[in-house]
Amino acid sequence: MPLFRPFLSFVLGLVTILSVAQAQARPQSALDVMTFEDEFTCNDKFPHHSFCEAVEFRPWSEAEKQIVGEYLANINDPRLGHLLEVIKSKGITKIHRVGYGATWYNNISKRRAEFVRSRDKALLWVNPVTNVIGFSDSFFTGTSFMDPHAKVDRKQINVFHELVHVFDVALGHISTSQEFYDSVGWHWDGKEHVIGGVDYHQSQLDFKNILALVGNKQSARAYAQDRELGIQYGFPTVYSMTNTHESFAEIISYYIFDPTAKDYLSPKIQAYVKSVLKED
């Protein structure tokens, strides 16, 4: 017995030390997971030099790091422990400062994938082909406004939205899984993927009208309309009804940041999100 007690104390002490170390290693926010990178190398093979030319990588300024760092620090909901762990262990964790976005195409004559600058002025983007997360000029120059329901900066949701894409890619594109399809209602109608139970084609016409507002430089009005119409359909945005990848990212983003999401997301969708996030 005298020998057992010291041994038991040693074991309990070791368990305590390991538990503390594990807790310290566990990310508390996205800021603990992501790192700011100033350099990216392109080559003659892949990613081809045209990628660097298209996006124009730039060094981060301290002011920009502080701005983005605050958005990352706000991604700290206790329900996101699993998501952050997956990104840390399997996902893209380096974020770059870029001027623009880029799209790729197959250059058949040269037998390689090359890139061209995208016309889309996205605030930030994830390119799973090159493993790059880019914060563009538009992120810092674009108008900032509050979400009418979530009561947070629209850019805050944008940042988390892209990290959900990283989470999705890290898990092998679960946004295309049958479980996600069943929870939302996505199915193949013989021509395209549509959402059952809603007037899907009308929703796509609604989205075209929203894009027209963006084209007319009415971004705040477009965003508000995207939210209002989306909620009427039972989704966070009309954008979340355009394809399964965006559907996955939008649903999880607003589930976390919009306290009213429980009022418009179906119980089936909410159950799926709880499952994929491994909520206790």
Image (cartoon, helix red, strand yellow):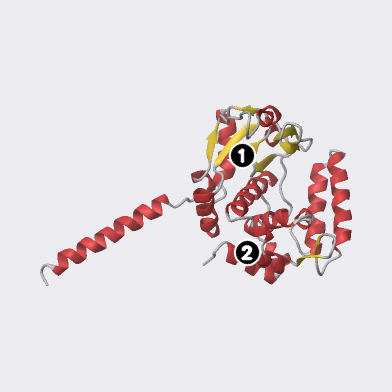
Position of residue 222 measured from the top left corner of the image (x, y, whole percent): 82, 47
Q: Which mark is residue 273?
A: 2
- Would you place residue 91 above or below residue 99 in this image? below
Q: Are marks 1 and 2 in contact (CB under 8 Å)?
A: no
- What's under tag 2, amino acid-wise? Val
Position of residue 275 measured from the top left corner of the image (x, y, whole percent): 58, 66
Quadrant of the snapshot with the N terminus: bottom left
From the viewer's side, name the closer residue of 82 and 244: 244
Position of residue 153 measured from the top left corner of the image (x, y, whole percent): 67, 46
Name which quarter of the figure residue 106 lies in.
top right
Q: Is residue 5 left or right of residue 265?
A: left
The CA distance from mark 1 to mark 2 is 26 Å
- What's under tag 1, amino acid-wise? Val
From the viewer's side, name the closer residue of 146 and 213: 213
- Would you place residue 62 above or below residue 132 in this image? above
Give the residue drawn at x 64%, y 50%: 165
Question: Label 2: how many residues lie within 10 Å, few (<14), some (14-19) or many (20+)?
Answer: some
Name which quarter of the figure residue 62 lies in.
top right
User: Mark 1 — residue?
Assistant: 132
Numbered marks: total: 2
Position of residue 241 measured from the top left corner of the image (x, y, whole percent): 78, 58
Q: Is residue 249 left or right of residue 200?
A: left
Q: Is residue 20 left or right of residue 270?
A: left
Identify the element where label 1 is drawn: strand
Give the residue drawn at x 39%, y 51%: 24
- Would you place residue 94 above or below residue 188 in this image? above
Q: Which mark is residue 222?
A: none
User: Which of the two labelled residues, at mark 1 and mark 2, occupies the earlier sequence position?
Assistant: 1
